[in-house]
Amino acid sequence: MNTAIVAIPNRIAKWSLTWALLLIVFSLLALTIPLIASFSALVIIGWLLVFSGVTQGLHAFHSIGAGDILWKLFVAILYFALGIYLLTNPLVGITTLTLILGIFFLAEGGIDLAVYIKGWRSDGSLWILLEALATLVLGLMLLRQWPSDSLWALGTLVGIGMLVTGIGRLMISLAVYRLSESTTPQR
């Protein structure tokens, strides 16, 4: 029995279970309306970049030295401009985001595969392998059809990725919850 898993409190397992279920619900929403999911992802990222640019700009004036201030202002302007560009050019933004997401899925799948290889004897490790393989396939699918399928593919594949991750996290959370329940002393 893995003592690291046994040490996880019951409360954390319940929160992990809750987040996994929420991820599954939001993934089904993204799969139902992929075009809206694509544009929503773009708008969220665009606004995050705008706010990050403003924050970086404000932070730049708290720096010491002209080089630090100029560099931080350059980064702030870059973030802000990129955010505005994504928000004002959504089709180009979605196409670019689709490419970035395909690369991200490949990287995430590779990392998940390494995690599986390292802990393949742990409870729930088969779900990590399934998540890794599914995420790698999604990344390859995105990059293979890029840029022609960007409008619907981004939302659909984000939904599928969220669903697979949600199910994987759900299975791991259930395994941890059952393990913590079986090791908790009965009163």
Image (tube, rainbow, N blue to C red):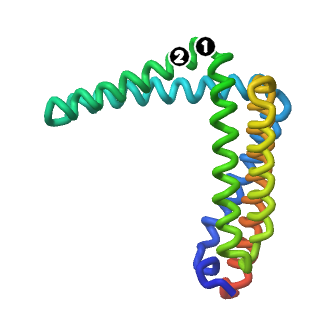
Where residue 133 appears, as percent x and y from the top left, is: 79, 57
Q: 89 left or right of 136?
A: left
The reply to whether the C-beta atoms of the residues labelled 1 and 2 are less than 8 Å apart is yes
Label disc, if present, on residue 85 of the rendered structure: 2
The residue under the point 61% across, 13% down is 89
At label 2, the amino acid type is Tyr
Q: Above or below — where is 98 with respect to 116?
A: above
- Does 87 sit above or below residue 140? above
Q: Residue at x 59, y 73 (%)?
A: 9
Quadrant in which the C terminus appears = bottom right
Q: How many residues crowd mark 2 within 10 Å: few (<14), some (14–19), many (20+)?
A: some
**Residue labelled with disc 1:** 89
90 up-or-down from 133: above or below: above
Helix, strand or loop status at disc 1? loop
Q: In x, y percent, where is residue 156?
A: 80, 34
Query: What is the x, y in percent for residue 148?
Result: 79, 23
Q: Is residue 162 left or right of residue 92?
A: right
Residue at the far top in the pictured view? 88
